[in-house]
Image: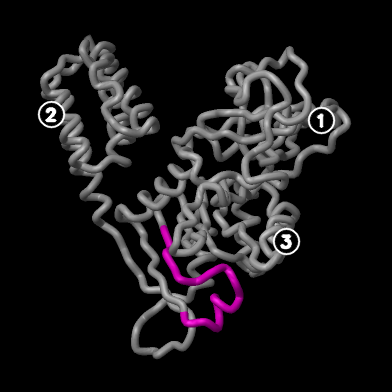
């Protein structure tokens, strides 16, 4: 009987883990409505909950919950209780937030405040998995760009949303893109395409948000652009939020705009990614065949498991004589199953000193994966493709 009991406990734990993922991104009222419906069902009828939410991402997580409920085989009332209890616990934990005032400009010395550049660097350095920065303009600030570069080298998924419309024929945005492509390899710039903006009688809309969110857990909302004047001279104000519901909501809002196509990864040729060479417009990464010859640019779709969003990016297939992409670049490596992530490598030696090889790790898009390449084969090693979005 003991092995059976252990198996049941493991199954319930998996159900709880799935439920926690679900409630972390849903309003308590939605979870309560789901629980009310589930209470009338048995685990064998769990499939009737499919499509309950309005978003594809939420229904994807719900499908995982439903499958674990089937396996756990608890009653509808028990399952509904788990949903409501997990939602309540999540909201109670989220309520434990810390808010700090952030300020640039004259200091009165009467109110405790943080400085904008200090907070930017602190958040960037704290990021372990993901970092999303929004700014109307971005001028090189050495300490901040060094922190971003270090984050990329740690395997952090770095994304930036910038205003792309240069006024009066200027080249400021394009110059910024060129600098990022050279100095911050691995970061992805997003833009709000002009055709997606509603240019009504009130004037032409701009991407005017200034914010940074790290790991969906810490957020800085500010009036300050990423310029030296905003960091040191202007009067700027903002708030730094640790915990609570705001960082997660901000992260989800930015990622949902990517999923819905409101904002797009910037392409040098156009705002939309270039079309694939041939075949289907978007190729699911699972359909890539390592025995087939590919060339040129391919539009690849895949699931970013870390951020729980579906991604579509343009990758360039690497030829044998291409240079190895730099560390931190987003690449695809084909094998028993395709791996996608920001790759890093390190030369290593076995304990007995008889074997020298390179350990290649893939980070940022899912669970960390690693492959080993023998030293003799390293000069010929190439990822299948590198991101060029």
Quadrant assignment, res 363: top right
Question: What residue span does the magenta drawing correspond to?
Answer: 219-235
Question: Residue 378, labelled with which disc?
Answer: 1
Q: Residue furthest front?
A: 201
Q: Which residue is rendered at x = 17% and y = 37% of the image?
A: 85
Distance of label 2 from label 3 (alpha carbons): 55 Å
Of residues 35 and 163, the one nearer the viewer is 163
Look at the image and say whether residue 231 sits in the magenta stretch: yes
Quadrant assignment, res 359: top right
Q: Which residue is mark 3?
A: 175
Quick check: 310 left or right of 75?
Answer: right
Query: What is the secondary structure assignment of the residue under circle 3?
Result: helix
Query: What is the secondary structure assignment of the residue under circle 1?
Result: helix
Quick check: 147 left or right of 92?
Answer: right
Quick check: 47 left or right of 38?
Answer: right
Crowding near the residue tagged with mark 2, few <14, some 14–19, many ≥20 C-alpha atoms within 10 Å: some
Q: Which residue is mark 2?
A: 36
Query: What is the secondary structure assignment of the residue under circle 2?
Result: helix
| N-terminal-most mark, 2 or 1 | 2
Does residue 128 appear anywhere in the picture? Answer: no
């Amino acid at each position: 009987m003991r092995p059976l009991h252990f198996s049941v406990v493991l199954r319930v734990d998996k159900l709880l883990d799935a439920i926690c993922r679900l409630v972390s991104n849903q309003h308590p009222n939605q979870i309560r409505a789901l629980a009310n419906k589930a209470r009338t069902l048995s685990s064998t009828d769990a499939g009737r909950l499919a499509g309950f939410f309005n978003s594809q991402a939420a229904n994807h997580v719900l499908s995982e919950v439903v499958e674990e409920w089937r396996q756990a085989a608890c009653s509808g009332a028990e399952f509904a209780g788990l949903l409501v209890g997990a939602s309540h616990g999540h909201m109670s934990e989220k309520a434990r937030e810390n808010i700090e005032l952030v300020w640039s400009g004259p200091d009165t010395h009467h109110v405790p405040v943080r400085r904008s550049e200090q907070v930017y660097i602190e958040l960037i350095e704290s990021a372990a998995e993901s970092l999303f920065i929004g700014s109307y303009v971005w001028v090189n600030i050495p300490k901040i760009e060094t922190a971003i570069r270090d984050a990329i080298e740690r395997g952090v998924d770095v994304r930036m949303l910038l205003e792309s419309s240069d006024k009066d024929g200027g080249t400021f945005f394009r110059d910024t893109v060129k600098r990022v492509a050279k100095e911050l390899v691995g970061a992805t710039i997003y833009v709000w395409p002009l055709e997606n903006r509603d240019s009504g009688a009130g004037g032409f809309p701009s991407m005017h948000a200034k914010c940074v969110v790290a790991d969906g857990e810490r957020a800085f909302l500010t009036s300050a652009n990423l310029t030296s004047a905003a960091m040191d001279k202007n009067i700027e104000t903002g708030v730094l939020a640790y915990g609570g519901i705001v960082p997660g909501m901000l992260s989800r809002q930015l990622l949902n705009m990517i999923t819905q196509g409101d904002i797009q990864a910037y392409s040098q040729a156009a705002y939309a990614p270039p079309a694939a060479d041939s075949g289907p417009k978007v190729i699911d990464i699972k359909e890539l065949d390592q025995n087939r010859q590919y060339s040129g640019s391919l539009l690849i779709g895949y699931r970013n498991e870390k951020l729980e969003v579906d991604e579509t990016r343009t990758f360039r297939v690497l030829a044998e004589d291409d240079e190895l992409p730099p560390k931190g670049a987003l690449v695809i490596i084909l094998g028993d199953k395709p791996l996608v992530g920001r790759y890093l490598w390190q030369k290593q030696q076995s304990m007995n000193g008889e074997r020298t090889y390179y350990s290649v790790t893939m980070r940022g898009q899912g669970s960390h994966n690693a492959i080993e390449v023998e030293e003799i084969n390293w000069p010929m090693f190439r990822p299948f493709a590198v991101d060029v979005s």
